[in-house]
Amino acid sequence: ERVYRVSASSVGHGTELYVLVFKDQSETRRIDRMRADFIANASHELRTPLASIAGFIETLRGPARNDPAAREQFLQIMQNQTSRMARLIDDLLSLSRLEMKAYLKPGARVDLRQTLESVIDSLAPLARDGGLVVERDFVEGALDVPGDRDELFQVFENLLENACKYGQSGGRVLVTVARSTAGPEPTVDVTIRDFGPGIAEEHIPRITERFYRVDVETSRAQKGTGLGLSIVKHILTRHHARISIRSEIGKGAAFTVHLPAN
Ligand code: ADP
């Protein structure tokens, strides 16, 4: 359905000249609707832990007042819910900061080898706790691409974190870097592959949407917010980069970031 706004204004005094403006508003409407959906989703996501905290405050004031064991348990839940709200707010702020920043600083370059090594280092405790070994296979030579170091760090951190969280059962995660000339421009391709349960085909096109989760309970148990991959997508768009996702149920998932080499 197309929606047009028609406006007419008279020009000058006593003349017969009118200007008609036809403006296609369907795109504006779509964006407005997306924004409204986003606000509704974000509010719901924040309200859920808040409602739980409010409920436990009531219980602590009433029935659990003189039960130290229950009190301790409820305080722990409240603390977990507070952390969840904090993670959500951090992710929402990341998204909104990205939306406000217009362009990347021209001329800046990122050393991918060094960036990936520090991402792997920073997630070593998570990998270790999940019994995972992180393996690397980086192509030889300099691996620097145009971009923002902090933003690309965030991209790889999100992808590796997901591989460690959701692919835990696979025992290992593989990080590869290769050069490619398959597309119209040469790219440097970074793949983060896990050998966990994988993602069913019908979910793949949607998992980069805000708040989209294949299984809400697993995502929550893994301290997910449902915003990680939408932040990834946002940053990659700013870098004129692309992400491709391949997965087979039971065999794991592979996320490849194709970054322009020049
Ligand atoms: P979350 O905060 O829930 O992890 P993301 O945006 O990072 O949100 O990911 C969206 C969803 O995609 C996750 O909830 C999970 O269902 C699925 N997902 C992401 N990475 C993987 C993976 N490596 N293996 C299986 N499922 C994954």
Image: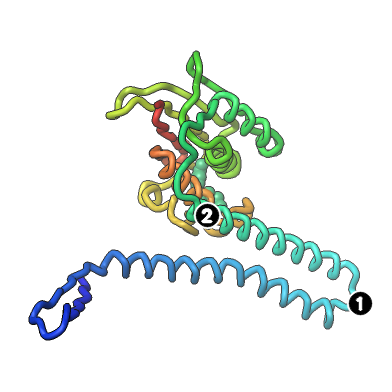
Q: Is residue 204 visible?
A: yes
Dot 1, crowdedness within 10 Å: few (<14), some or many (≥20)? few
Determine which residue is flagged by label 2: 95
| The residue positioned farthest toward the left in the image shown | 16
Q: Position of residue 65 (x, y in %)?
A: 88, 78
Task: State yes or no: Cβ of the residue under disc 2 lies below 8 Å from any atom of ligand 1.
Answer: no
CB-based contact (under 8 Å), mark 2 and mark 1: no
Q: Is residue 167 visible?
A: no
Determine which residue is flagged by label 1: 66
Asked if 224 appears above or below 46 in the picture, the reply is above
| The residue positioned farthest toward the top in the image shown | 140
Decide if residue 5 is on the left or right side of residue 59: left
Q: Amino acid at mark 2?
A: Leu
Q: Nearer the viewer, residue 139 or 206?
A: 139
The quadrant of the picture occupied by the N terminus is bottom left
Asked if 91 appears above or below 104 in the picture, the reply is below
Decide if residue 48 is on the left or right side of residue 10: right
Q: Position of residue 95 (x, y in %)?
A: 52, 54
